[in-house]
């Protein structure tokens, strides 16, 4: 349509700066409005019919509240990936007005990349799994503080076996220090380790409850991904919360690029140069897939726990998971035989694991569509 108006919004916690790119070519700033629901509603009313508006703003800490409000008003809205906004070399002036004008101009020309906006169920689950990830990081820091405190006293975990097992913690609790300040510091470090462990356990129980209460399609996808070796419920819930419907990726390579686990490249003419992974993607997805990839250093096998996770799944999903074990385990051993670093091998295996995650996700979504069709027919 020739009379479409493209609107760019620069959002902060107090106000929204608005700019409009007219169909005829003019880009102008409209000033700032308070960041309230009523002010946004009045702005939409002033700009014209909602079906002729195209609004965008950058993804950020304010979430998707503005997106949902504009969508309810009948306005098409896109949330833009900030790192993919084109930037001119030498541009050193940055203001809210200029940012809004740039958004409107680039949005009209089609140079912006929108992000996937999760629905309420995905966003709630994502908040929970990220809270658990933060708790795990805090637990690691608490353990490091205590272990380094003991190391300064010449106390090591060699006699108590592997670090942070039940036996190791029992040994730590038997320790005593003569000086009162050291005893107080030790007890405080130990309390933080125990508190962090309780926090992680509490959040993992909450994730189990959230998965049980999730919509049927999400539960089915989480269960399907657990057919893969190295992916249990917390990992599967993290992947689903971060990625959403896997069918939004037309092919596996797009999911690999979304994770940032693809090689960087700087090629020109006959010269082809590839470097490390780009890391230009979802860091949470990249971390969880990298952890799962370590499981494929072992030979293909079906443990009792893995067989239990696969019990209620379709034969097609089980076949994909078994194929993943053979292919990825073979790839791991082949790269290890060439003398590659284990970290690089894990990244390569994790990137290929994403292809199997995509395939299982597509298969589960097809099965869910078939079940819904049968239900409607009945």
Image: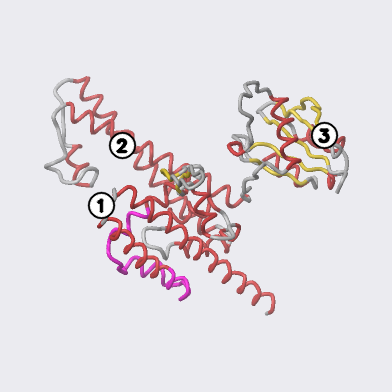
Task: Give the percent coordinates (x, y) of residue 62.
Answer: 63, 35
Label 3 neighbour load within 10 Å: few <14, some 14-19, many 20+: some
Task: Return the residue at label 3.
Answer: 43
Task: Give the percent coordinates (x, y) of residue 319.
Answer: 43, 73
Q: Earlier in the sequence, mark 3 or mark 1?
A: 3
Task: Give the percent coordinates (x, y) of residue 213.
Answer: 54, 57
Is 63 located above or below residue 225 in the figure? above
Residue at the outermost front position: 270
Indicate whether residue 299 is drawn in magenta. Answer: yes
Q: Which residues are magenta?
A: 292-320
Separation (CA) of disc 3 from disc 1: 62 Å
Predominant secondary structure in magenta?
Answer: helix
**What residue is drawn where x is 34% and y is 42%?**
197
Task: Give the percent coordinates (x, y) of residue 298.
Answer: 27, 61
Say the numbered circle drawn on residue 193. Answer: 2
Would residue 238 appear left or right of 94 to someone viewing this image? Answer: left
Indicate whether residue 139 is drawn in magenta. Answer: no
Label 1 neighbour load within 10 Å: few <14, some 14-19, many 20+: few
Q: Earlier in the sequence, mark 2 or mark 3?
A: 3
**What residue is drawn where x is 31% and y is 38%?**
194
Is 46 located above or below residue 167 in the figure? above
> Which color scheme does this rendered protein use?
secondary structure
């Amino acid at each position: 349509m020739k009379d479409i108006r493209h609107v760019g919004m620069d959002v902060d916690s107090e106000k929204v700066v608005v700019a409009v790119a007219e169909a005829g070519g003019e880009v102008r700033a409209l000033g700032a409005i308070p960041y309230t629901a009523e002010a946004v509603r009045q702005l939409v009313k002033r700009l014209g019919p909602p079906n002729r508006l195209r609004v965008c703003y950058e993804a950020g800490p304010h979430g998707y509240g503005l997106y949902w409000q504009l969508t309810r008003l009948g306005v098409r809205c896109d949330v833009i990936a900030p790192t993919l906004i084109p930037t001119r070399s030498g541009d050193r002036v940055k203001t809210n007005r200029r940012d809004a004008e740039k958004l409107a101009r680039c949005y009209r020309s089609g140079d912006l990349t929108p992000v996937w906006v999760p629905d309420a169920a995905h966003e709630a689950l994502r908040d929970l799994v990220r809270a658990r990830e933060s708790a795990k990081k805090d637990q690691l820091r608490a353990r490091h503080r205590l272990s380094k405190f003991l190391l300064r006293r010449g106390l090591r975990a060699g006699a108590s076996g592997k670090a942070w097992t039940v036996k190791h913690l029992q040994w730590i609790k038997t320790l005593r220090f003569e000086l009162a300040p050291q005893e107080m510091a030790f007890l405080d470090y130990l309390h933080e380790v125990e508190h962090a462990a309780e926090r992680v356990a509490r959040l993992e129980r909450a994730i189990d409850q959230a998965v049980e209460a999730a919509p049927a399609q999400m539960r089915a996808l989480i269960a399907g991904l657990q057919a893969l070796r190295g992916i249990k419920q917390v990992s599967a819930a993290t992947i689903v919360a971060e990625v959403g419907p896997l069918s939004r990726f037309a092919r596996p390579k797009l999911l690999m690029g979304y994770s940032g686990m693809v090689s960087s490249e700087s090629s020109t003419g006959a010269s082809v140069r590839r470097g490390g992974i780009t890391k230009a993607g979802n860091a949470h997805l990249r971390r969880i897939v990298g952890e799962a990839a370590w499981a494929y250093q072992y030979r293909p096998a079906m443990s009792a726990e893995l067989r239990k996770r696969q019990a209620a799944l379709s034969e097609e999903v089980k076949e994909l998971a078994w194929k993943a074990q053979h292919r990825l385990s073979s790839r791991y051993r082949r790269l290890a035989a060439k003398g590659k670093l284990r970290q690089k091998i894990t990244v390569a295996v994790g990137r290929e694991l994403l292809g199997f995650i995509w395939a299982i996700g597509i298969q589960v979504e097809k099965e869910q569509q078939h079940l819904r069709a049968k239900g409607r027919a009945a």
